[in-house]
Every structure is written in C-alpha cells, then in structure tokens.
Amino acid sequence: MQFKHPELLYALFLLIIPILVHLFQLRKFKSVAFTNVQFLKELTLQTRKSSQLKKWLTLLTRLLLLSCVIVAFAQPYISNSKSFNTKSETVIYLDNSFSMQSPSNNGSLLNTVIQDLIENIDENEQISLFTNNANFKNTSIKAIKNDLIQLTHSPSQLTYDAAILKGKQLFSDDDDTIKNLVLISDFQQKQEGLSLKNDSLINLQLVKLEPSSRSNVAVDSIYISKSTIENLELTVQLKNQGSEIATLPVSLYNNDKLMAKTAVSITDEAVTNFTIPANTVFNGKIIIEDSNLQYDNSLYFNIDQREKIKVLAINETDDEFLSKIYTNDEFEYRSFNFNALNYNVIDQQNLIVLNELTELPNSLITTLKSFSNNGGFILIIPSSKVSLDSYNQLYNTLNLESFGEPVKTEKKITNINFSHPLLANVFDNRVDNFQYPKVNSYYRNATRSANSILNFEDGTSFLAQSGNSFRFSAALNPENSNFKNSPLIVPILYNIGKKSLKTGDLYYTIGKENKIDIPTTLQQDDILNLVKGEDAVIPLQQTFDNKVELTTDTYPEIAGIISVKNKDQFLKNLSFNYDRSESLLNYYDTEQLGNYDTSNSVASAISDIKSATNVNELWKWFVIFAVIFLIIEMLILKFLK
C-alpha cells in the first residue's frame, strides 16, 4: 500500500491526546449522601468495573476512528507502478503482411485483430499504431477507426527487430512514463530468424495470433520450359501445404480471356504445362482456386516481341564457338575481322567481344571506353602473345587489374565462385569432382577474389569482372586451353550476353530491386513512365545512347501488368508479382523467446497493460471504517451502562 500524501500520517502522533484524556480522570467528583454503607460498597465495586470497560472500548473506537480519518486524508492506494498517477504510453505494431490473410474463427487474422483493437481499447485513449506500410502517431482508436477498417495487406513486412526499433522511435522522451510496446503478429518464420533484444526501458508485449488452418496452395513460379519456332511451352509450378488435393483447377488467361484450363492432383508440389503461340504478345495470368491465402492464387507474366541482344565479335582468330552460343533466336550476332572493323557499328551493340587481338590501338581503346560509359558490356579474350602496354591501358580504363608477364605453366581451373551473379541458377549443387579445364599459359594478375568468377588452383584469377567488363587471363584457342570443351563455357558466355541487355523477365518481384533495360533512344527532356490505368509513376532511370535502364523497388505496390511509356508512346509491358515467402505457414514459438509477456489475444494484452497502471484507491474504505467506528462509539456510550 502506498500514499498520495504520506506526510499527513504524522497526524497519527496526535492520537496520544485522547489516550491522555482517558488515562487521567479530568471529571470533578460530586458528593452524594447515602445511608446503606454495605450496599454502597457493592455498588461502588460494580460501577468501577463497568466504567473501566466502557472507557477502554470508547478509547479503542475513538483511536480507530481518528486513525481511519487521518489515513483517508493521506489517500492510500495499491498500484503496480512505482508512483501515484503514473502516465503510460502505448505503441502498437500491427502486422498486415499477406500471411495475416490466414483464416481465424471470425474472418481473416487481420480483420479479427482490427475488430479486437476497436472493441478493447478506449476510443479516446491516446496511442500510437504502425503497420508495415502506415503510421498513426499520438492518435486514438476513434480517430483512426475508418483507416483500420479499410486497412489492406502489405507486400512487404518489417523484421521484428525493425518493428521494435520503429516502435521505440514513436515513444516520447519523457523518462517518467511507462512505455508499453505491443507486437501483434502471427510470427511467421522468416529466413533472418527471430531474436528479440531485452530493453529495460520498455515493456514488450507479444500477441501471437493463431490461424484456424495452416493449409495453403500457391502458384509458386512459371517459366518457359520449351521453345520452338511456332510455340512456347509454359511450365507452372505449384506448392501445397496441407492435405492432398485430388483436383485443383488451374486457369490460363491472356488479358481477361480464358485461354486454357486444366486440373492437377497435388500433395506437396506439382507442375502443369500450357502451350501458347510463339512470337506473339501475351499478357498472361495463372489462377488457381484456394480458400486460404488469396494473394498467391494468381501469378502475372507477359511475353513481348523481344528485342534481340546485339553482339559484335572483333576477331583475330576463329569465332565459331561464339556463333554457336549467341544464336539467332535471342541474339543478333555480328562478326568482324579486326582489320575490317567498322567503328560506327560499335555504339549500336550491347556486347563487344575482343577475340584474341594481339594489339589494341588507341582509337579502339577510346571507342571502347565511350561504349562502356554508355552501359555497353565488353568481354576480353587475350591472345597468347599480346601487347601488354595496350591491353593494360584498356584495363586501366575499365578498372581491371593489369596483366603481368605471361607464365608458361599448365594450370587447372578448379575454383568456381558459385555465389557470383553470373552463375546464379547454373548449378543445382556445388560441383567438386568434374574434369577441370586447363590452360598451358596465362597472364599474371592480382584480381581481388570478390571480382573473380573462375580461378586457377593457386587462386589466380582466370575470369574476372569489373562493372560491365569481363576478362579472361588466358587465350582460349585449342593450342593453349581446352576451356572451349568445358561445360562451363556455354552458361558463362551466354549469361554475359544476357546481362548486356536486360530484355525483361517473364515477371518481377515486388519489394526487390529490379533493373530493366528498355531499348529506346530518348530525346532531350524525355522521361519514361510506368503506367497502370490512370496511375503513372516516374521510376529511377539511367539513360544511355541506345537504352534506358529502369530500377524498381517498392513500386508497384499491387501485383499486375504495367506499361512502360514515353509520353503517349507505348514501349513494352512489365509484370510484377508478390514475393512468395509468405506462402509457407510455419510459425515461431514465442514461448521460447525468453522473458517476454506473451498472449494470444488483443483483449488479454490490453488488460495486462491496464492492470499494470491501474490504481486501486483505498481512501473511501477508510472513510467507511471511520463512520462505522463512530457509530460503534455512539452505541457504546448510549447502551453500555
């Protein structure tokens, strides 16, 4: 028990006054004549006994009466907080990611928790609330009720550590307030794991929501599995979490027109194929029917008239291996002998291959520098006997490490940088025991490991990258190397060609950085726009001579197909889909996180917060006791003879 005015308790020392009054008889004695002495003795003895009892009872009730009055004025109370009338602040994180579409007993998890917030928080109480994509600071449920009811799901989610950090920023700087941070989420398992840091300055409350079902079927991905002159075969990959589904309808749309429909049986994973005409514009959408999570029931994609990637080879040796890799279906491959090179065509290319040139004239170095600065890609294959000065002059321009003197020693190419973007999706597993290619001679170089793609057994770089430039450190002709016969050459050279012009994937993922090349030439002050219906956004873009590189991240926020336009001129379509990471419904066990308050409902969490700051005032009870003791004293004085 605590007191609002504890200084008034000093008045209890005044209780010594009634004690003194009762101990000393201050009444004057009155003489009364009496004839029977024996009866007088008996009467005196009986009167003294009853008088002593009455005085002690009166003293006790009077002391209790005065004590209750004094304590009542001191205003006693019982509270979990350290001081009377302590203020509290409440900040709430509401997870509105796609996994919160999971069903509960009263609709989706998100709709249920919104209704619980409205019902359990006083409508005028000041709170701060934030979601993955919205903030409401120092507001009330009454003020944001409509915003909460209309709240939609977000394609991105804050990490839990980021949510705690953001929540701390919404508290005031007042050190005397109790700070309550409530995290409301289903606590779906993520790649980054879950580890919350203790903070003595805030009371962290976790509200873990449990879905009524953990079943879900998702359209995971789509890709072109086969291509002919006439047709493309699309493969759709589906994933299921839950019981086996005997018949799952899968539909293919072009714009809003149903093109094909099939059904699959799925346990964990399944694939189905659709065939569409080649060389036609196709704005597609795959749709399945599933009553659980809704966001992953559809997947958008589009196939445009694709621009061919322009590759120019400048040769002083045979280029047959290049022409077999850069085929006519995806590339526009041109080949020049170095002595017959037309410099005017270089700026029109996406990739320039220097195929074993002995010497690089200054005019070519200058042209290649300008080409690289305009976003062009360069692949350099040196000859066995090069002019080191001219090559190193080019390398210095392209920020590549210089060549040293050639080393005529056989070396095997044994180290593969599997994490390099050029080798993404090339290997299903890391390969350690295949027949390693080799070279008979190579050029010394000090390429940093971070820029190296393939290395010799001693760690020296065989293939390195710097920006848009790639460089082998040895000749690839059959007399010097068998690398042309290696299974590595096709995916490496093919991917270098594909990187030189990002012609557009079937679709992109919302929330991830996407770089997309639009082959076009802009006039001065022209800007490309992303257009969907009546909405238009100017994305981050970099203009080159023959293309514009777009960078998207948070836009668009809604999955679908959007158009790239230069003013009113249509250039191409792009498809965007939500990240599928929310589709796997596995959850953390918050009970194992440590010393945190955890509940499974908003009502319970809000009740805990209120009980921590509620003040149970006791002064009324002491007033009641004072009245009771007053009545008891009056009864004693009146009826006790």
Image (tube, rainbow, N blue to C red):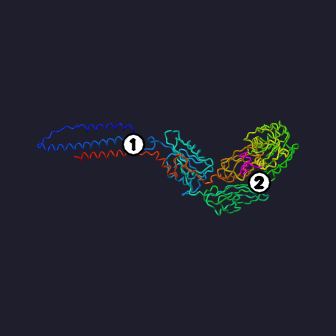
Mark 2 and mark 1: span between their CA atoms?
81 Å
Kindly tell me whether residue 147 is visible in this rendering.
no
Q: Position of residue 343 (x, y in %)?
A: 84, 42
Q: As drawn, which residue projects farthest toward the right? A: 339
Helix, strand or loop at mark 1: strand
Residue 273: mark: none
Look at label 2 and name its amino acid: Gln
Residue 305: mark: 2
Kindly tell me whether residue 226 is visible in this rendering.
yes
Look at label 1 and name its amino acid: Pro
Name the residue rendered at 32%, 37% in the picture: 14
Question: Which residue is the site of mark 1?
Answer: 76
Residue range highlighted in magenta: 417-434
Helix, strand or loop at mark 2: loop
Q: Where is residue 471 in the image (x, y as percent from the top left)?
A: 79, 42
Q: Position of residue 453 (x, y in %)?
A: 75, 44
- Viewer-nearest of discs 2 and 1: 1
Between 359 and 118, the residue placed more toward the observer is 359
Left/right placement of residue 58 relative to residue 2 reads: left
Q: Residues within 10 Å of mark 2 (few under 14, many from 20)?
A: few
Left/right placement of residue 525 relative to residue 64 reads: right
Where is the N terminus found, in terms of image quarters? top left
Which is the main secondary structure of the residues drawn in magenta?
loop
